[in-house]
Amino acid sequence: MIALFLALLGAGGFASARPVDSLARAYAGLPDPRQPTLNSVPEAGAAYRQAVDKSWTAYRSRTGQPAATWAAKHITPAAGGTVFYPFAGPDLVTVAQLFPEADRYVLVAMQPAQPPLDPLQLSEAARRNFYRKFSSEWQKFGRLGFFRTNDLDADVRDKQARIGLTTTLMAFAVRLGYEVIEVSPISLNPETGEFEPLVNARTEAWNSVRLTLSRAGKTVRVDYVRMDLSNSYLESHESSRVWMARMTRHPVFLKAASHLPQNSGFSIIRDAIVMNAPLLVQDETGIDYRELGKIGDVALYGHFERPHPLFNPKSQQSLAAAYRVSKISGELPFSFSYQKASSQRCLQVVRRRVAATTAQAY
């Protein structure tokens, strides 16, 4: 039987009889027609719902819908399968719109997922603080289209608002039209090499989380994995390194990755992607352009001259040169990643080059 209810989340946690989808809809400022008694509770208030609606509508019109339309034409991924999104934070929104037919999304970042909470079990003051803070997060994502690491770290430290990545993932899921069926903490089993659900997990065990979603009769899984992708960590954690390498055999998406894949301290994941990925979609913060040719032919979209001022101005000089000489760089009609101006935002799509084979008939 599908588990629809949150369990007791250990000492210091809470018990809630609310369906997880009801919680997700509350986070997203959406009514829950299956829980009419809860609709009468002024849980978030009209101001919160209006602020979230406004931010989501602005994001969808400026970025989300144009990106989905563009992806259907230029990425055209096969239906089903897994998409691997390293350095993702809780950005389910972007990867789900660029790869809408995937069966599984695997997102990796450094922050703990943390368990969801039921705002109805908070004091009135704490509940107001939760929604005030989360409203700010909605507005920031609606404006930027990505999550800043400093903000995610600050959310982890904030023990009053208690907004974790699980909360954000659940809210995004229902805004994308999914029903949230189940939410559970997961951990890597060294024996099987897979992330598996934890039973009766305490609050502090919610480092990684799995969301089971449903839309139009299709079940989709979202795994958020807390993992350090640096060489120093992967070299000393073999099971994590092996799992990561296996994930790179799926289509890979890189966005707002702070140019980390170009850093020598992240060469293990870079090399795994270059060696294994059948498809790579990235912005300028992903893998250095000089490495992309080892995968296959690179399709350039948008324009690129230099990195965002936050980063090393010498990064991706070969990519800038490729854009200067390219006569066929395609359109990128939506705001994306760190670069917002149409003269700077860019994406690259690289498909694995199939080795030529010679067949001889006898």
Image (tube, helix red, strand yellow):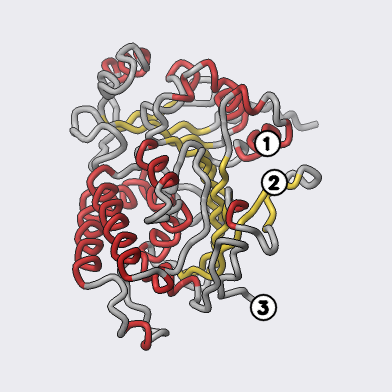
Q: Which residue is mark 2?
A: 188
The CA distance from mark 1 to mark 3 is: 31 Å
Q: Which residue is mark 3?
A: 1
Residue furthest to the bottom: 37
The quarter of the image holding the N terminus is bottom right
Q: Secondary structure at mark 2?
A: strand
Q: Is residue 35 above or below residue 237?
A: below
Residue 101 relative to residue 198: left or right: left
- Using a 10 Å C-alpha cutoff, classify the residue at mark 1 as few (fewer than 14 neighbours), some (14 to 19) or many (20 or more): many
Q: Is the residue under label 3 in contact with that under label 1 (CB below 8 Å)?
A: no
- Viewer-proximal residue among 346 and 229: 229
- The label on residue 323 is none
Q: Is the residue under label 1 in contact with that under label 2 (CB below 8 Å)?
A: yes
Q: Which residue is mark 1?
A: 240
| Res. 229 image quadrant | top right
- The kind of residue on which mark 1 rests is Ser
- Give coordinates of residue 215: x percent, y percent: 47, 69
- Viewer-proximal residue among 229 and 131: 131
Mark 2 and mark 1 lie on one chain; the one further toward the N terminus is 2
Q: Residue at x 49, y 42 (%)?
A: 111
